Amino acid sequence: MKKTVVIGASPNPGRYSYLATSMLRERGIETFPLGIRKGEISGIAILPLQQPPLLENIHTITLYLNPKNQEGYIDFMLSLKPERVIFNPGTENYAFMQKLEENGIMALEACTLVLLQTNQY
């Protein structure tokens, strides 16, 4: 399975990060939502982004933070050593993408919701 971390998760059901987390869970993908607001998504507690837990064997990070807000978490994301990071619309950060590729991590500009709905995840 493609164990996934959702960075920028929100307890607001109208947010794309909420929808993506729900869809990942519906498809049986082990998912870890990390955000700045407390709450839950589909019965999973949102973990604190400010003090992220130890996570291992992460396949994918799907990003829902704008480039400015990504800055403080780049080292953390690199430390997870995912196979890929999905930059959802509005999160594109070409300097970070280059850093990922230099570390052997695929940087993908895509929409997680579309990838899931079209079985391309």
Image: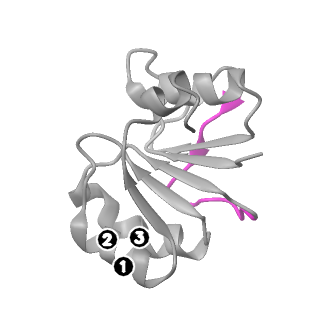
Looking at the image, is 56 positioned above or below residue 21?
A: below
Residue on which disc 2 sits: 96
Residues shaded magenta = 44-56
Using the rendered image of the protein, determine whether residue 112 is visible from the camera's viewpoint: yes
Check the picture and name the quadrant holding the N terminus: top right
Q: Nearer the viewer, residue 51 or 121?
A: 121
Determine whether, in the image, residue 16 is placed left or right of residue 21: left
Residue lying at 53% horizontally and 53% vertically, measured from the top left? 61
- The residue indicated by pointer 3 is 74
What amino acid is at disc 2?
Phe
User: Is 120 or 20 nearer to us in this picture?
Assistant: 120
Q: CA distance from mark 2 to mark 1?
A: 5 Å
Q: SS for tag 3?
A: helix
In the rendered structure, are the residues bearing label 3 and label 2 in contact, judged by CB atoms less than 8 Å apart? yes
> According to the image, label 1 marks what residue?
99
Query: Which amino acid, by three-letter code, is at mark 3?
Result: Ile
* Position of residue 105 in the picture relative to residue 97 (left or right): right
Q: Residues within 10 Å of mark 3 (few under 14, many from 20)?
A: few
Q: CA distance from mark 3 to mark 2?
A: 8 Å
Tell me, yes or no, whether the two marked residues, 3 and 1, touch with CB atoms within 8 Å: yes
Left or right: 55 as drawn, with respect to 76 = right
Helix or strand or loop: what does disc 1 sit on?
helix
Q: Taking 112 as reference, is 11 above or below it?
A: above
Residue 42 drawn above or below residue 3 = above
